[in-house]
């Protein structure tokens, strides 16, 4: 399963900005769900997030904990 979320906001310079608490939290949850997360951002163009989950059934416990 793939989930793609993007916005057309300010964006940020990924080379200059370290990962903030929000990004670290997202990555922790994605790892718990046995998935992958990629993020891209460009100043003035917004930010895009790609989430990949190969086997959703392996994450039964995680689904109960994190997904409504």
Image (cartoon, grey):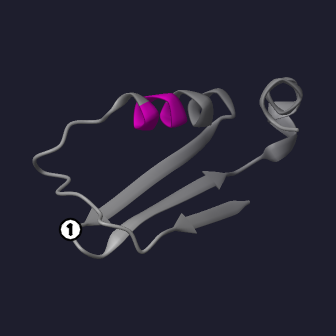
Occupied quadrant, residue 23: top left
- Up the image or down, 3 lies above or below 58; here it is below
Q: Judge left or right: residue 14 versus residue 6.
A: left
Pick out the residue farthest to the left: 16
Write the residue at 47% across / 69% down.
7
Residue 61 in percent (x, y) is at 86, 23
Q: Main secondary structure of the magenta part?
A: helix
> What is the quadrant of the C terminus in the image?
top right
Q: Toward which corner of the image does residue 64 lie, by quadrant?
A: top right
Q: Secondary structure at mark 1?
A: loop
Q: Residue 46 appears in which quarter of the rendering? A: bottom left
Does residue 23 show up magenta in the picture? yes
Q: Residue at x 43, y 54 (%)?
A: 38
Q: How many marks?
A: 1
- Percent coordinates x, y for residue 25 in the rendering: 50, 29
- Nearer to us in this view, 10 or 34: 10
Q: Residue at x 69, y 34 (%)?
A: 33
Q: Is residue 10 left or right of residue 22?
A: left
**Classed neighbour count for the residue bearing mark 1: other residues with Cα under 10 Å, few (<14), some (14–19), many (≥20):** few
Please give left or right for residue 47 compared with residue 54 in the image: left
- Between 53 and 9, the one nearer to me in the picture: 9
Residue 40: percent from left, percent from top: 34, 62
- The magenta stretch spans residue 40: no
Quadrant housing the N terminus: bottom right
Residue tagged by mark 1? 43
Say left or right for 55 vs 60. Answer: left
Q: Nearer the viewer, residue 1 or 40?
A: 40
Q: Which of these two is toward me, 63 or 16?
A: 16
Q: Is 57 above or below relative to 15?
A: above
Q: Which stretch did the figure color magenta? A: 22-27
């Amino acid at each position: 399963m793939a989930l793609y979320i993007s916005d057309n906001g300010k964006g940020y310079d990924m080379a200059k900005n370290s990962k903030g608490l929000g990004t670290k939290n997202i990555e922790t949850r994605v790892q718990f769900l046995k998935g992958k997360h990629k993020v891209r951002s460009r100043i003035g163009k917004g930010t895009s997030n790609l989430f990949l989950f190969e086997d959703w059934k392996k994450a039964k416990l995680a689904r109960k904990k994190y997904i409504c």
